[in-house]
Image (cartoon, coloured by chain):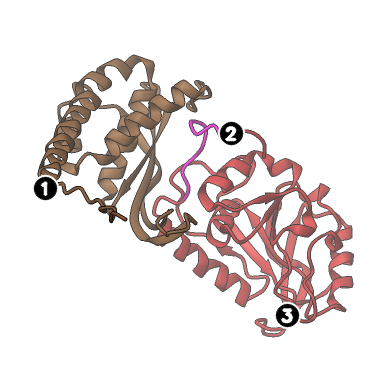
Amino acid sequence: MPDTIPTDDRARTARQAWLAVLAKASLAELEAAWDELAEKPAYRRLRPGETGLVMLRGRIGGTGQPFNLGEMAMTRAAVQLLDTAGQVSYAGFGHVAGRSTRRAELVALFDAMLLDPARHAVITADVVAPLAARQQTSKAVRTAHVMASKVDFFTMVRGE
Amino acid sequence: MSGVLDFARLEPGFDDAVRGAQISFRALLDAMAHPGRIVTSPASLGGAPPSPLGPAAAAVVLTLCDIDTPIWLDAASQPAAGYFAFHCGAPVVDSPAGARFAVIADAAMMPPLECFALGSDEFPERSATLVIQVADLTNGSGIALRGPGIRGEAWLGVAGLPARFWAERTALAALFPRGLDVVFVCSDQLAALPRSTQITL
């Protein structure tokens, strides 16, 4: 049985990258990508989608100490792909902001498919790359929009 | 437990976590309220229970354990460590004394009862609950049980326990309210032996 946990740093970073893209995708985008799949894998739910709260922490105070900013709804799911013999092959995980269990499950499904060397290239090209491009574009648009109203603050030094 | 979990080998827990835990809790409540009564655990698991444990053993642990309840697993039930860690988030501890729940798959080799946490007089609830998987459970013969929840006398036959078990259990009675609560499980059946129950051999 293949090991589903990337052990070296590079594989882990790659997985973090595709999970970050998938987690930011909307439910409609994920559903569309799933519908367009040529062959949908059989799977079972290892952990059906469940919603909980995560505490967001950040160094937002003046002193740089970690501060509990507040809680955020988060949904997680885990699925296992089944091969043609009905045996479990790969396990995928999905964590998304909000309360959509289907969204978390779709992220987990794509994660599992990306771990499968036979499917990795196709899913990367057909699902992750377009999503990443769209996210990049919308981020650029938003950045440009915000930058248009940028104001530089500075303090004039009073002359002696 | 050592190393990383192999997620491809894990089995799912309850097929519906909330309903499964509620149904299973109700069955346990019934069993605890009527010591010696054999109750069928009706909760359905989404996959096979972790070998060598049966569905009732898995359901009891999934229902009662979480991140605040350290579990001790005997040597035979070690393969279930990953399953409980993943589905309950419960820490698995090495020593029986540090555990709030103990899962015993091989009853014949179980450690003496005084190895487990018995609570204190001030905090008797800080004791362990033992989930012991046995070969067979029968009513109508075996050990006579008396006490709260039992009208008159109940008879519980437990196959596969070491002979010393009942002597050790009798010795614990003097420590009440300290003591151990025991849930016997066998396939999908369970029966409870709370600390308040008196036994006659």
Q: How many marks?
A: 3
Q: Is residue A150 magenta?
A: no
Q: What is the crowding at mark 2: few (fewer than 14 residues within 10 Å), some, or many (at least 20)?
A: few
Colour in which the image shows chain B: red
Choose the circle earlier in sequence order: 2 or 3. 2
Q: CA distance from mark 1 to mark 2?
A: 49 Å
Q: Which mark is residue A149?
A: 1
Determine whether, in the image, residue A110 is placed left or right of residue A13. left
**The residue under label 1 is which amino acid type?**
Ser
In the rendered image, which residue does mark 3 sit on? Answer: B153
Which of discs 1 and 3 lies nearer the camera? The answer is 1
Residue A90, visible in the rendered structure: yes
Colour in which the image shows chain A: brown
Q: Chain of mark 2?
A: B
Q: Chain of mark 3?
A: B
- Relative to the observer, which residue lies in front, B140 or A93? A93
Q: Which residues are magenta?
A: B4-13
Q: Is residue A129 above or below residue B29?
A: above
Q: Chain of mark 1?
A: A
Image coordinates of residue B175 in percent, x first then y, are: 85, 77
| Secondary structure found at label 1 | loop
Image coordinates of residue B132 in percent, x first then y, are: 71, 56
Q: Is residue B12 magenta?
A: yes
Image quarter of the N terminus of chain B: top right
Q: Is residue A124 above or below residue A107?
A: above
- Relative to the observer, which residue lies in front, B184 or A138? A138
Determine whether, in the image, residue A99 is placed left or right of residue B111. left
| Secondary structure found at label 2 | loop
- Relative to the observer, which residue lies in front, B9 or B28? B9
Which of discs 2 and 3 lies nearer the camera? The answer is 2
